[in-house]
Amino acid sequence: MRVRLEAVSRTYRMGRVDVQALRDIDLRIDPNEYIAITGPSGSGKSTLMNILGCLDRPTSGRFELGGRDVSKLGDAELSRVRNARVGFVFQTFNLLPRATALHNVELPLVYAGVPRRRRREMAREALDRVGLSERARHHPNQLSGGQRQRVAIARALVNSPSLILADEPTGNLDSATGEEIMQILDGLHAEGNTILLVTHEAYIAAHAHRQIRLRDGRIE
Amino acid sequence: MLALENLRIALRSLWTSPLRSFLTLIGIAVGIAAVLHVVGLGRVTQDNIRTRLESMGLNVLLVRPGTSLMHGVRTAEVVTSLTWDDAQRIEAESAVIRAAVPTYSDAGSAEYRDVNWQTRVTGTTPVHFSVNNDTIAAGRAFSEREVLQRARVAVLGDTVRDELFGESDPIGAHILLNSQRFTVVGVLEPKGEGWGNPDDQVWVPITTAQERLYGVDHLSSILAQMRREEDFDEALFDIETILRRSHRLREDQENDFQVRRQDFFLAATRDTTAEIAQFVVLIAGVSLLVGALGIANVMLVSVTERTREIGIRRSLGATRLHILAQFLTESVVMGIAGGLLGVVLAASLNELVLGGRAPLATDWVFYGFGICAGIGIVAGMYPATRAAYQNVVDALRYE
């Protein structure tokens, strides 16, 4: 599914000052691309990721997902698009602490309205793909950092999204575990997924096939 | 199914901090228990009163000597103003009054073998028993002939029978009433705990009471039975007219008698207890309000604590409605759990402390759950809305 940003800007109001996080971004992402978005702190990487992930809306400009303009969608619609098209992997994992790995993975399917039995099946498959089938009934606090991130990846995959967004996926992991995670992501790309990495580490960005560098809200 | 999922989340949430949940629910529980008890007790009381009312004579007016309760000095003249003659006139001259029963009532002592029992002796005519809705349990009432003969015969109330005779048969036995020898001809069915204990009485013919026992020629009261309930105003008028004429009262003189419905006090009591019950329910309602505030408070804290979780769910595609429904389910579950606790509280209080005397009104148990669910919705609406409208990006960053 193709992604297109045209003249996208995002401005925040902080007290009495307007902060322009993104200025006039033009971006095109084709299916099965492997992209790294890099840049120093405050360059607007997170803001760009939030918009691409349908967590936030641009202040101006056009955002097309698969030919459909999603920049003007209402909150409920946007949530549905997010649910169906986007899979997130966060630096801090963001798993529900009081739910099992399996339940965490099936959560997007719950909100998609998938019936229980099918949900469980799909979740197990996803956990299998990241090699965590035996840990399905464990809670996050019983898992290592690397395992938690794998659960997060399984969760991102379970609804067969068009776009997988990974925000500093190895930020909270040691280098060996981080490397494992990057290999999983590489594998996912090889299987045909579109991967968007946001990172400030050059060696992580190097896994991607294309790099987009941001500075002060613009693409360099 | 999403609703089931929300239910599971809600129950898990309650279970996570049991102490906190318990403290929150107590407010609702106490409110519900109070409401259930008041309604239950109120029902029992009203039932008792209704049974009592039904056991009294229907459509009976009580005519008593003396001026109305509020003012007037009781003089010897006035207290003896009612006579049997008055009763006979009322019965004869009023179209709406079926029967006018004379009574004379005074304290007396009843003796059998070596048991002496202070009781109330009432002289009357045989028709009294039907007018007053009394049932003969054994033997018979005295007859018109015995009235004419001033016969020394007596009908015992159940309490007197029990005190003097216990298990043995009183019919035909001889007792002493105020030291005079009487024959027991009948016994009445018990009427239960009454106003002025109706079972602790002995009935004798009116003539016997007036002439042989007490040496009087006036009455304590006249029981006037109307043909129909609707005839009240006309009956009242008739009685007043007849008595005023009979007592030769001038226009400027007040009545030297009072007429009242026999169930007057009982009805007044019923109304008063109903009002009191309503008031207490109101107070219990305040307790429920406090309980609701408790739920709202805990929900607000819970929402804040779970800001990150809300962000995560939203990022996975939960809509605002999903989040709203999730938290509303929690507050409703809390409300209903409080209601459950309240029912348990009320039931145990009834069993253990009150010995089963205040049974719960079952229909109100259902209303109670409805009220609790309603409270849950209302109390949780604001916190749930706050949760739903939480900014996703900020929520994800929340520590």
Image: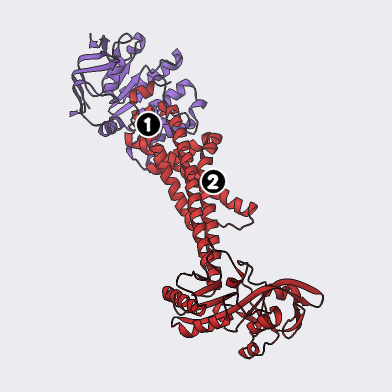
Q: Secondary structure at mark 1?
A: helix
Q: Amino acid at mark 2?
A: Leu
Q: What residue do we see at 42% from left, 16% from top?
A: A178
Q: Nearer the viewer, mark 2 or mark 1?
A: 2
What is the quadrant of the N terminus of chain A in the image? top left
Which numbered tag is attached to residue B387? 1
> Splitting the image into 4 quarters, where does residue B55 fall?
bottom right
Looking at the image, residue A45 sits to the left or right of residue B166; the answer is: left
User: Which chain can be seen in red?
Assistant: B
User: Which chain can be seen in purple?
Assistant: A
Q: Is residue B117 above or below residue B304?
A: below
Q: Is residue B289 above or below residue B368?
A: above
Circle 1 chain: B
The colour scheme is by chain
Which numbered tag is attached to residue B341? 2
What is the quadrant of the C terminus of chain A in the image? top left
Q: Residues within 10 Å of mark 1 (few under 14, many from 20)?
A: many
Q: What residue do we see at 46% from left, 69% from top?
A: B252
Q: Amino acid at mark 1?
A: Ala
> Splitting the image into 4 quarters, where does residue B115 fall?
bottom right
Q: What residue do we see at 47% from left, 43% from top?
A: B286
Mark 2 or mark 1, earlier in chain:
2
Asked whether residue A43 appears in the rendered view, the answer is: yes
Image position, residue B271 (x, y; %): 49, 60
Asked whether residue A130 appears in the rendered view, the answer is: no
